Amino acid sequence: MATLYGLGVGPGDPDLITLKALKILQTAPVIAYPATMSGDSMARAIAAPHIPAGRTELPFAIDIRTVHDANEERYDTAAAGIAAHLQAGRDVAVLCEGDPFLYGSFMYLFARLAEDWPVVVVPGISSLNAAAAALARPLVAGNETLTLIPATLPEEQLAARLKACEAAAVLKVGRHLPKLKRALAAAGLLERADYIERIGFAEQRQLKLRDLGDDAAPYFSIVLVRRAAESIR
Amino acid sequence: MATLYGLGVGPGDPDLITLKALKILQTAPVIAYPATMSGDSMARAIAAPHIPAGRTELPFAIDIRTVHDANEERYDTAAAGIAAHLQAGRDVAVLCEGDPFLYGSFMYLFARLAEDWPVVVVPGISSLNAAAAALARPLVAGNETLTLIPATLPEEQLAARLKACEAAAVLKVGRHLPKLKRALAAAGLLERADYIERIGFAEQRQLKLRDLGDDAAPYFSIVLVRRAAESIR
């Protein structure tokens, strides 16, 4: 019986793929990946140096900027396309930016296919771990909690979550940047926030969030913040 | 000038190291790693298949079961040992279980050495990402928040954090298991909790938390929980 693989390819640098994901990527006959509505695929771009020539490729278009409901049909279609290959006995490796099970589109395919097919998930480096490394900034230590917060939340909820956190990684910043800055200010955390975008790509850029204008940030940008005044030592 | 590397080696499976960490590991002349007071090193055990013969090894003993203060002097000693190699022009790679900046002991060496030496941190697969993959259980989706909570917190704080979370990964379970079960029950989450220990090792074991006895769990065990009744789809 053919196997469906969910392969975390990490946040950007092709060398941040794991050996385990690499081995599967080099042998799977079919390689699927999410793409934007205009056909760009960040997951494929990250894995590109590792994809052998001559593989069957199966991109599926997802609109990451819209609510999930609008993508339901697209995931149905993608799952059907993958299932057809599995049915024909061909393993399918789905490339996933970052980690497949942390806000990844793979989980929507998993929900559609895991009952009928064997699934192996290979974890990937999450963007927050790569952000901490690139910013030379520990995420969390000792008895502290760390909250992962999507910037897509309504402003009040965003501010409430930030007020309650000890340390936070705010993901999916993108066009939510002005709202996020207001919420961080309301939570008394704006001065402590670091910003990074396009981690691991040539265009990587990082600065103190307070020094960043209110123009829209790329979707794959992250803000790290920690409440404690003293540094981790 | 010699460089200090903090290398995430992942949570257990040697194949969950990244290509980037592997390349550095294969060339660094000095390899340092935390060990228990009895001399065992989980980080070294994970990386063992990748360590070339003839490297200088520099284990440093840390008591992970005690409060951080008691380890201050041990970190001072470890940092001095590492600095001596850097001073002599030799790069030092510190092996870190999971990710160096997510509750990792590396951050305490970083705090002591980063002002004087160039430091490169290579992120690693965190145990929570590996736990989600092994349990075939998505961590968090859409607009949900995910809170990382150390089980070492006092019971009241643990219960309060769990009550306020949408999804949580509880780390460092170990001897805090009975307390954690009470806190999860108080937060109405015990029935939804999955438990996994020794992820990626031959002794990996996973079960519903409610089916686990109150005996102490290994330190490196994790509980995943999500409040929403509906599955991610």
Image (tube, coloured by chain):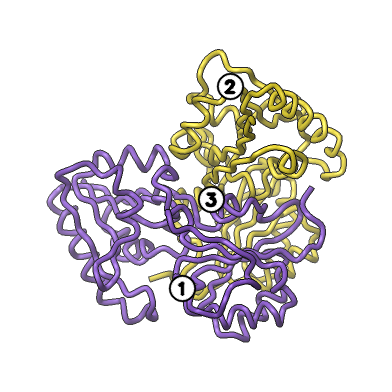
Chain colours: A purple, B yellow
Dot 1 or dot 3, earlier in sequence? 1
Residue at image mark 2: B29
The answer to the question of whether label 2 and label 1 lie on touching residues, with beta carbons closer than 8 A, is: no
Residue at point 55%, 48% (across, down): B126
Q: Badge 2 local density, few (<14 within 10 Å), some, or many (20+)? A: some
Label 2 – label 1 distance at C-alpha:
44 Å
Say the numbered circle drawn on residue B142.
1
Please say if A222 is above or below B194: below
Mark 1, secondary structure of its residue: loop
Q: Secondary structure at mark 2?
A: loop
Residues at marks 1 and 3, CA–CA distance in whole angstroms? 26 Å
- Of the numbered discs in the image, which one, if any, rests on residue B207? 3
| Residue A162 in the figure: left or right of residue A33 | right
Report whether A125 appears left or right of B110. Answer: left
Amino acid carrying mark 3 in the image: Leu
Query: Mark 1 or mark 2, which is nearer the start of the sequence?
Result: 2
| N-term-proximal mark, 3 vs 2 | 2
Marked residue chain, label 3: B
Marks 1 and 3: CB-CB under 8 Å?
A: no
- In the image, residue B44 sits, relative to residue A149, either above or below, namely above
Q: Position of residue A168 (x, y in %)?
A: 64, 65
Q: Are marks 3 and 2 on the same chain?
A: yes
Q: Looking at the rendering, in which quadrant would you find the N terminus of chain B?
A: top right
Number of other residues with Cα within 10 Å of mark 3, as a class: few under 14, some 14 to 19, many 20 or more: some
Q: Amino acid at mark 1?
A: Gly
